Amino acid sequence: MPHADLHVHTTRSDGQLTLEALPAAARRADVAVTAVTDHDRLHPDLDAPVVEREGVPIVNGIELRVAAPHERIDLLGYGVDPDAAGDLRAECRRLQDDRIERARAMTEAVEDRLGIDLDLAYEPGVGRPNLARAIDAHPDTDVDYEAAFDDLIGDGGPCFVARDVPDFERGLSLLRETCGVVSLAHPLRYDDPAAALELAPRCDAVEGPYPYGSSVDEGLVERTVAEHDLLVTGGSDAHDERLGLAGLSEGEFDRLAAHL
């Protein structure tokens, strides 16, 4: 079981965990340290780079989608300084407005395609997992959560709508102004992992441990880390209440913590 799970989403974006429930989820998974990394949104109840809740250290973080030259990727910011986050908060507000409009458009497309009405709350933080759960829960369709992504709202799917995101340079600059560590998220998930990893040296770290769920060449990440002497982050990318699927050892986290 990992010592630190540094990729967790809460109800502030498209996760199912509240911040209040996070310490108990960490204890159930025997995880000592966590990080909140909501999509394009800072958590208002995390008022320092690292806070402690019920004895569990929680790193204040964010996952920011950006447009790289070859495709869209995600950057993880860790150790957010709330006092320095003015520009990042402004960009997050713009991104949340775009998320809501995107969710409306995708919901309408799904409803037209399946001939159903979906009950989805269009609130800041809404994302595709919220829509996939609504599809899965609807009594008049047999499309489950995974099939919703595979057949409807996944990238390039018939109901997919792209978002208006900042470019890589802008996103990296915003995170550097605000965070102690910037990491390239889940590099082996992208269409071109090698091209994504070429951007890793521009960051402080790269996400290593991650529950990819399929055969991937983790050596690509290990070689990039060694060649450029990068820090390593890692986590479950939890959107439900299960933590500890991936993460850092105590030694790996201690090296990272020195920069937070």
Image (tube, helix red, strand yellow):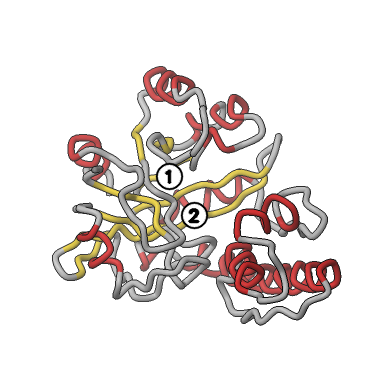
Would you identify the image quadrant in which residue 119 lies? bottom right
What amino acid type should be assigned to the residue bearing mark 2? Answer: Glu
Horizontally, residue 205 falls left or right of residue 23, namely: right
Q: Residue furthest left?
A: 55
Q: Quadrant of the N terminus?
A: top left
Where residue 129 appears, as percent x and y from the top left, is 58, 63
What amino acid type should be assigned to the residue bearing mark 1? Answer: Val
Residue 136 appears in the picture as rendered = yes
Using a 10 Å C-alpha cutoff, classify the residue at mark 1 as few (fewer than 14 neighbours), some (14 to 19) or many (20 or more).
Answer: many
Q: Residue at x 39, y 57 (%)?
A: 8
**Label placed on residue 182:** 1
Q: Residue at x 48, y 21 (%)?
A: 220
Residue under label 2, please give it: 63
C-alpha distance separating marks 1 and 2: 10 Å
Q: Residue at x 22, y 52 (%)?
A: 31
Horizontally, residue 109 falls left or right of residue 6, namely: right
Question: Is there a contact, CB below 8 Å, between mark 1 and mark 2?
Answer: no
170 w.r.t. 130: above or below: above
Q: Which sits in the foreground, 117 or 50?
A: 117
Mark 1 element type: strand
Using a 10 Å C-alpha cutoff, classify the residue at mark 2 as few (fewer than 14 neighbours), some (14 to 19) or many (20 or more).
Answer: many
